[in-house]
Image (cartoon, rainbow, N blue to C red):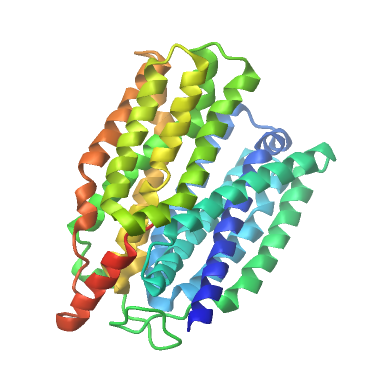
């Protein structure tokens, strides 16, 4: 059983890394795709909303499917869809075809996101200790590798269509090779991985517990704050502090590096101090880091602020995903999809919220909104302490509560 669990963990790492790699390769090739499709920056901005909308739809659909059929079935299928659809944007030759391609690719990405997180919760339940943040760290590493590979293929003057298709084909291979190592569905009332047994119902018939929506609200706030770094960190350093373009690019690099390192460290800290402490102190640290960015008159201090911001946020969202998955093992997929979906909407809302604020106040002052959201999340972190829903009653419910407390919430 220990070997089965180790192999399942390695397979989960593979899917997280694959997802990060696929998304990273797409981001690197956005300018080439835009040129081939012949669309303007403004039109591309609207079309990217279709990618987000497709991802949200995929998340909402996949959660209940994972509960019904098991992540062992849904994860590989989602990875195949995401990998195969990566080639579509590279083939688009107009706004309509690019929009359709992004909708399908976003849908595949959303399916894989929820499916692999649902399986990660099952693996974490088997280990009976936090392991979720490491999975998300590998996702970030996949994005870094994608940037390196993309830079190399671009230097070779490879077309976006050829590169995206080649990476998609490699993704199909990874998706199929890793599939046999995934865990089978857990029988009702179990607290660890099972070799077989029927999958329980998705548990949605009794309605969504208020605690799940509270976790989803926290995910929305924290992921909106996280999205601010990707959308505005470089612009803030350039426009507010007058940094050269090369120096301004270091702002997001500092954030992303700190977030990756933080995720590699979070599991051990969560095992020792608990998920409530991770979210409370992490969100507070993030608020302090971004506050330094707001008030800093110096480029080095602003860079340090972005790094502290990334370190603080690094472990928060994984804890929320894990808490949702452990709240009710029989509806883990549906609950993760709710938290991930609302959180993803928060990340999409970042540009829409911060942009209009810059018409009223300077960009760095607009960052006070995500600072406030981080502070609210820190104050509300106690929601992670709530006990999971007692689906089985009696001894079974007590044992689930013990396992969830030992494992802690994850992303």
Q: Residue at x 52, y 13 (%)?
A: 239
Residue 232, position as x, y percentages in the image = 48, 26
- Whether residue 356 is visible, yes or no, is no
- Whether residue 252 is visible, yes or no, is yes
Give the farthest residue toward the left.
394
From the viewer's perspective, tell me whether residue 371 is left or right of residue 236: left
Q: Residue at x 38, y 27 (%)?
A: 290
Residue 69, position as x, y percentages in the image = 43, 77
Q: Residue at x 27, y 43 (%)?
A: 280
Q: Residue at x 51, y 19 (%)?
A: 300
Residue 177, position as x, y percentages in the image = 66, 73
From the viewer's perspective, tell me whether residue 179 is left or right of residue 308: right
Residue 263, position as x, y percentages in the image = 46, 49
Above or below: residue 86 compared with residue 389: above
The answer to which of 339 and 30 lies nearer the viewer is 339
> Which image quadrant for residue 319?
bottom left
Total marks in image: 0
From the viewer's perspective, tell me whether residue 153 is left or right of residue 67: right
The answer to which of 92 and 133 lies nearer the viewer is 133
The answer to which of 383 and 41 lies nearer the viewer is 383
> Which image quadrant for residue 76?
bottom right
Which quadrant of the figure contains the C terminus? bottom left
Give the farthest residue toward the right.
156
């Amino acid at each position: 059983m220990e070997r089965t669990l180790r192999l399942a963990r390695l397979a989960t790492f593979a899917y997280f890394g694959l997802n990060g790699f696929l998304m990273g390769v797409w981001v690197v090739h956005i300018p080439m795709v835009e040129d081939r499709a012949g669309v303007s920056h403004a039109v591309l901005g609207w079309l990217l909303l279709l990618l987000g909308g497709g991802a949200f739809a995929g998340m909402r659909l996949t959660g209940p499917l994972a509960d019904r059929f098991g992540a062992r079935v849904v994860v590989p299928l989602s990875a195949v869809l995401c990998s195969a659809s990566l080639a579509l944007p590279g083939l688009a030759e107009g706004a309509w075809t690019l929009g359709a391609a992004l909708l399908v690719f976003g849908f595949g990405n959303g399916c894989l996101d929820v499916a692999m997180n649902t399986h990660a919760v099952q693996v974490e339940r088997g280990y009976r200790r936090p392991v979720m943040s490491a999975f998300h760290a590998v996702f970030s590493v996949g994005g870094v590798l994608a940037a390196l590979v993309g830079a190399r293929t671009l230097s070779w003057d490879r077309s976006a269509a050829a590169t995206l298709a080649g990476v998609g084909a490699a993704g199909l291979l990874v998706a199929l090779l890793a599939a046999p190592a995934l865990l089978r569905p857990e029988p009702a009332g179990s607290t660890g991985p099972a070799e077989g047994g029927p999958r329980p119902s998705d548990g949605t018939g009794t309605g969504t517990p208020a605690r799940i929506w509270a976790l989803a609200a926290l995910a929305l706030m924290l992921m909106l704050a996280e999205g601010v770094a990707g959308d505005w960190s470089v612009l803030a350093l350039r426009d507010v502090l007058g940094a050269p373009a090369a120096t301004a690019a270091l702002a997001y690099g500092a954030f992303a590096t700190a977030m990756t390192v933080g995720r590699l460290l979070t599991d051990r800290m969560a095992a020792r101090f608990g998920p409530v402490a991770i979210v409370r102190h992490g969100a507070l640290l993030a608020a302090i880091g971004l506050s330094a960015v707001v008030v800093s008159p110096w480029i080095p201090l602003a860079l340090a602020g972005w790094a502290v911001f990334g370190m603080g946020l690094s472990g928060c969202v994984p804890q929320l995903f894990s808490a949702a998955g452990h709240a009710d093992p029989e509806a883990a997929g549906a609950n993760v999809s709710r938290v991930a979906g609302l959180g993803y909407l928060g990340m999409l809302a970042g540009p829409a919220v911060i942009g209009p604020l810059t018409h009223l106040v300077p960009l760095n002052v607009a960052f006070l909104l995500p600072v406030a959201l981080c502070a609210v999340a820190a104050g509300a972190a106690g929601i992670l302490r709530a006990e999971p829903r007692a689906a089985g009653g009696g001894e079974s419910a007590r044992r689930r509560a013990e396992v969830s407390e030992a494992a802690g919430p994850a992303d």
